[in-house]
Image: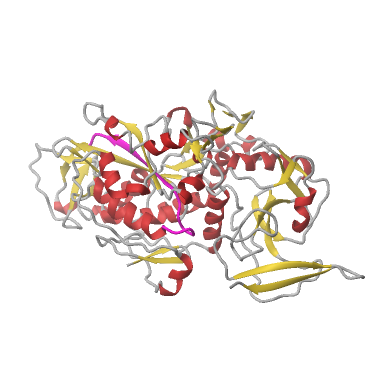
Amino acid sequence: MLYITGLAYTRFTLVRNTMPLNWGQLYPYDVYGIRSQRDLTLNVSMNQNVWPAVNLNSVLFDTLNYTYDAMANIPALVTRGASRLFINLYWNSKKNQFQFCPFVEDSTSNSTVTDSPNVNDLIFSYQNRVYACNSTMTVANFLQDIVKNQVILPTDNNLWASVIILTFNLRSPTVAQIANARRKNEIFKRQDDEGPVTSDLVSASSLRAATSTSTSVATTTTINPKSNLGVQIHEVFGDYAYTPSQLTIDRSVTGLTWNESGISNTGWPLLENVLFKTLHRILFSFGEMDIGLDVYDTSVDQDYIFDRNDIPYSGTHVVNYDASFSSTELSEIASPVCSFNNMTKINISGTNITVPPHWLLAQDSSNLTFTADSIRKYLQCGFSPVLNATIAPINSMKEYVISSLSAARWSWAPGQPTEISNSTATAISAGGVVRRCAVLTSSGWQVDNCFAKYRVACRVAKSSYNWTLSDKSVTYYNAPTHCIGDSVFSLPRTAVQNTMLQLLRNNEVDNEPIWIDFNSIAQPNCWVSGGSGAQCTYATQHRILIEVVVPAVAAVIIAVLLARM
């Protein structure tokens, strides 16, 4: 089976046949926007990054049911930028293990297990509605068949790899009756606009070598579903999982962990260390707990699953989206929904909430769903949006997810980056056009002509949030030399840094763009920082070299396309 991941197609084997919805392909600007934002945040500690999140129960399962087909949509969410997933686990006291179905059979009911859309699905009736639950899905099945084999392994290469946080909410199931067989078709009436369909199948052979540096092989391991969660995680993921034990080791080494103030033995490692140096792909944490320690003792998992203090899930780190965050007074970035206190605390406007700038969450609800504008306002304050609304019909749910995850990219403006690629050797005269350099505008980052003249974003050395602008407007190629004193040509690497630079831009140049240190001069669609001479770390086939030749009369710019050996 082929699973579509934007512009790349990865071939792998599924342990079970599943039928996900057709989410469509990503646009090129989605693919390059997601990848470039990942790359520019590699030098940021894990706790200061933004983690766009989806509550799987609210968004997916309540609409699509608790089945393998519904689970098979999770890879599409991750491909589109979801990096944190919340999921409910329900403790079945009879089986002495967790399950994904929110119901257990009413023992007093005279109903019997009836015909269902799938031989392994039970149909429950609850509050005048019916739900399908797969009776064979265990936590180990989910971790292995869905998360590892469909999310981690197909993307285990430097182009597509990302770190995912999976948060478990531990709950008690609801007693419900098995539905009469005549009610099973109600499940499909909720899916009146589109049922589960398979993704388009295309040949991956020609793209495989260009998009992957590793081979993905689906795995099957027999795991006791009654084992504690930590043991199941270890048996499925091994070193793929970054654990509390590893964090303790990292914090014992000076210089490996950071917070908003710098190096700290209570901070977190940089994303680059976790993802590309130690090759971890996933973290697990506990969220809400409706069951007591007498039912399930979470301390047995402390070496594998982060507790709620390590990676917050609620409390003062969560703001519920309400109308006050979309009022007219907050429509301009000059009046953001938060204020900053020396960057050690963030004050939320209209509330008494003051929080440190890490692991911040903002969640919506079915009554008031996120808009693209409200998501951007939260991002300006460093909050990660949590999609938490139950929406029907299915097409509306898909649009809600797609638009929200697209808006959750705090860097690029909508529809960006879009560049003009030079595929052949081209002579470029002074004043020519090379659309390979990034500017900060009022709507976000955009691709612009590297020969255009704008003022330059200069970050004050040893200060993550203090910016200045160059006195003169210059081309991108001359930008580094116009950051004077202890400032350097740079770019924002967090959403909050971007907010601080945006405020400065608004105050000093109004609607004019400013240069930031991000370009794809070396290779089309490979965005890097480090000035015009920065190398692309992915591709080694071609590079466009800009050579400045100064004759007696005028300067001539020559672009030479070189084939690398």
- The residue located at (42%, 32%) in the rendering is 310
In this view, 188 is above or below 423:
above
The range drawn in magenta is 156-173
In this view, 91 is above or below 192:
above
Residue 374 point in image, percent of width and height: 55, 42
Asked where in the image residue 311 lies, by quadrant, the reply is: top left
**Outermost residue toward the front?**
253
Residue 387 point in image, percent of width and height: 44, 44
In this view, 54 is above or below 527:
above
Q: Is residue 366 visible?
A: yes
542 lies left or right of 6 = right
Q: Magenta stretch containing residue 166, yes or no?
A: yes
- The residue located at (64%, 35%) in the rendering is 329
Residue 428 point in image, percent of width and height: 76, 71
Asked where in the image residue 328 lies, by quadrant, the reply is: top right
**Outermost residue toward the left?**
110
Residue 146 point in image, percent of width and height: 31, 54
Q: Is residue 348 visible?
A: no
485 lies left or right of 499 = right
Comparing 44 with 141, the one in front is: 44
